[in-house]
Amino acid sequence: MGGVCFLIEIHPLGHSSFHPLRQAAPWYGFVEEAEICELQDGDCKGLRKAIELIEARATQRDLRLVIRDWANLDWIGFPFVEKPPLRSSWDDLCVTSNDSGKRDWNVPRVATVCHPLGQYLRCKDLDALKPSWNDEVFWRGTRLFAEAIQQMCWFRFEDFLAAPKTILRELCAALVIPYDPAWQQQWNSYTNITGEEVCVKRGGIEPSERRPVTQETWNRLRDNDDFYVTLELLGYPLPEPMRRWQTQSILLVGRIDKFSDVAQQGLGWRSGALAAGGPARSGRYGSTTPTGRSVAMDRTGR
């Protein structure tokens, strides 16, 4: 994007992996080697000072600074953080240094999400995460993240793939940065990126086929409340294989209800003893049922 500079995977708990000054120096030449100070993981005040320096240098060149954080460290943690805080560490960056609790760094913040099942499959296949992988920790953190971003503007990656110009224009508006239509001719030549080194053939921006899901994975997800709630919070429908299972369960309950009179006669049947996925689940955002209906919400999550 013209007029914008990016820093990527920047996080108070991840300085040892991605140092903002060491990233800004080679990518943009914003700082000299002598200006780079070491930061300890967890040093929010040091990170804020570094970002303020980078922002000042970017402003001198008429550039707007945009930072993508490393949310894994807050909500999932492994293998980099043993006990993730289960809240956004960026909240601490917006508090004054005199510990008054007053927010004085009012930077626009947005979140981007993708289908949680697709994210699960991709993350589980990453070499860096495999040795310490934990399904329960992943889904707990994913649900808490989905709950937390309801307080800000957020965008689904699948919506971007379906209408990239429209969604990117809306995202720029939310971040209060200018939209540059030239990105459509330039995006596939971007080099300032992070992540595992893989060979990627960059074609057009379009949806790709989802990775195959094993029956074992579907079986584990059936009783996963975190998965159901995350789908609803982010507005994704229940996957078709799980809809089939829910339909079969509902039919089974219907058969049990037919025998309710027999149950009352003491023949060993108890109406409702086998429920379709269990009772309705109540959470912070109201009651949800195993049918996977999407709750009504706009872009701000209201």
Image (cartoon, rainbow, N blue to C red):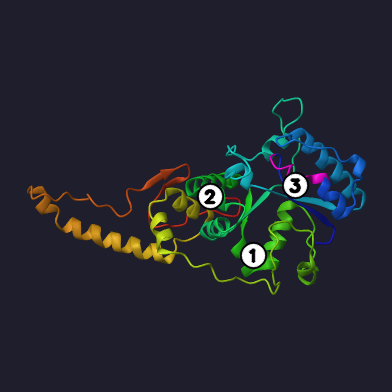
Q: Is residue 138 above or below residue 106?
A: below
Q: Residue at x 16, y 49 (%)?
A: 270
Answer whether residue 14 is visible to the viewer in this image: yes
Q: Position of residue 136 (x, y in %)?
A: 47, 46
Q: Residue at x 77, y 33 (%)?
A: 45
Would you say the magenta stretch is mainly helix, strand or loop?
Answer: loop
Local packing at callout 1 (Cα closer than 10 Å; few below 14, some 14-19, many 20+) is some
Local packing at callout 2 (Cα closer than 10 Å; few below 14, some 14-19, many 20+) is some
Distance of label 1 from label 2 (alpha carbons): 29 Å
**Direction front: furthest residue:** 131
Q: Residue at x 68, y 66 (%)?
A: 166
**Quadrant of the rendered structure where residue 98 is?**
top right
Q: Which residue is mark 1?
A: 160
Residue 18 numbered tag: 3
Q: Is residue 212 above or below residue 293?
A: below
Local packing at callout 3 (Cα closer than 10 Å; few below 14, some 14-19, many 20+) is some
Residue 253 numbered tag: none
Q: Which residue is mark 2?
A: 133
Q: Position of residue 279 (x, y in %)?
A: 32, 48
Left or right of residue 52: residue 197 = left
Q: Which residues are magenta?
A: 13-21
Q: Are marks 3 and 2 in contact (CB under 8 Å)?
A: no
Residue type at mark 3 is Phe
Q: Position of residue 115 (x, y in %)?
A: 54, 59
Between 88 and 282, which is closer to the camera in this rendering? Answer: 88
Distance of label 3 from label 1 (alpha carbons): 27 Å
Q: Are marks 1 and 2 in contact (CB under 8 Å)?
A: no
* Badge 3 or badge 2: first in the primary sequence: 3
Label 2 secondary element: loop
Left or right of residue 254: residue 236 = right
Query: Does the magenta segment cover residue 261?
Result: no
